[in-house]
Amino acid sequence: GGKASRAGGKKQGLKANGGKREAGGGAGVITETEGKGTLVINHSTNIDGLLEVLQRLTEVRGVATLVPGRLSSSKSNAPRLVLRVSAPTPDGFKCIARKGTQVQEVFVVSDLDQETLEAAIAWSL
């Protein structure tokens, strides 16, 4: 088959093959552990300590995928690493990680509700 036999967008393809995606063309390194969520490592730079927190968060049942997003800086200062739920997305939630003046988006693909996810984040910190 040609293009007509392919599934729709990336989101559908991600779900159709069990959440696994082949990394091609420098798309990112995907770490997977049997029975746990997936942490997509697609940036060379992340907020210090964030990957360790996200790795613990993959152990929570209901968390399918964690994708660190864009890194930026702000004027205000967070003395320690903070991860909070920012907004719902079609597949889960967008979270904001902060430490010092660095700010980073984290996308969570999950079927958990916001309250449960916030409790899981508090546990993982």
Image (tube, rainbow, N blue to C red):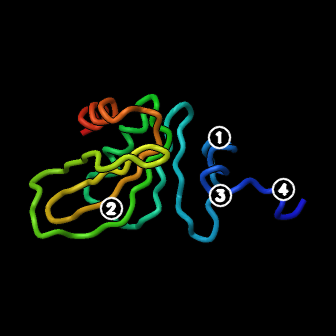
Q: Amino acid at mark 1?
A: Gly
- Secondary structure of the residue carrying numbered label 2: loop
Out of 46 and 97, give the one closest to the viewer. Answer: 97
Mark closest to the chain's N terminus, 2 or 1? 1
Looking at the picture, how far across and down is residue 83, in whole percent?
25, 47
Q: Which residue is mark 3?
A: 9
The disc at residue 5 is 4
Looking at the picture, how far across and down is residue 69, in whole percent?
39, 61
Q: CA distance from mark 2 to mark 3?
A: 27 Å
Q: CA distance from mark 4 to mark 2?
A: 37 Å
Nearer the camera: disc 1 or disc 4? 4
Query: Residue at 90% across / 59% down in the picture?
Result: 1
Mark closest to the chain's N terminus, 1 or 4? 4
Q: Amino acid at mark 2?
A: Asn
Q: CA distance from mark 1 to mark 3?
A: 15 Å
- Residue 3, above or below 37: below
- How crowded is the residue under tag 4: few (<14 C-alpha within 10 Å), some, or many (20+)? few
The disc at residue 103 is none
Q: Which residue is mark 1?
A: 18
Q: CA distance from mark 2 to mark 1?
A: 26 Å
Query: Residue at 39% across / 56% down in the picture?
Result: 68
Q: CA distance from mark 1 to mark 4?
A: 18 Å
Q: Is the Cβ of the residue at disc 4 closer than 8 Å to that at disc 3?
A: no
The disc at residue 46 is 2
Query: Residue at 38% across / 46% down in the picture?
Result: 88
Q: Is residue 19 left or right of residue 102?
A: right
Looking at the picture, how far across and down is residue 116, in whole percent?
33, 29
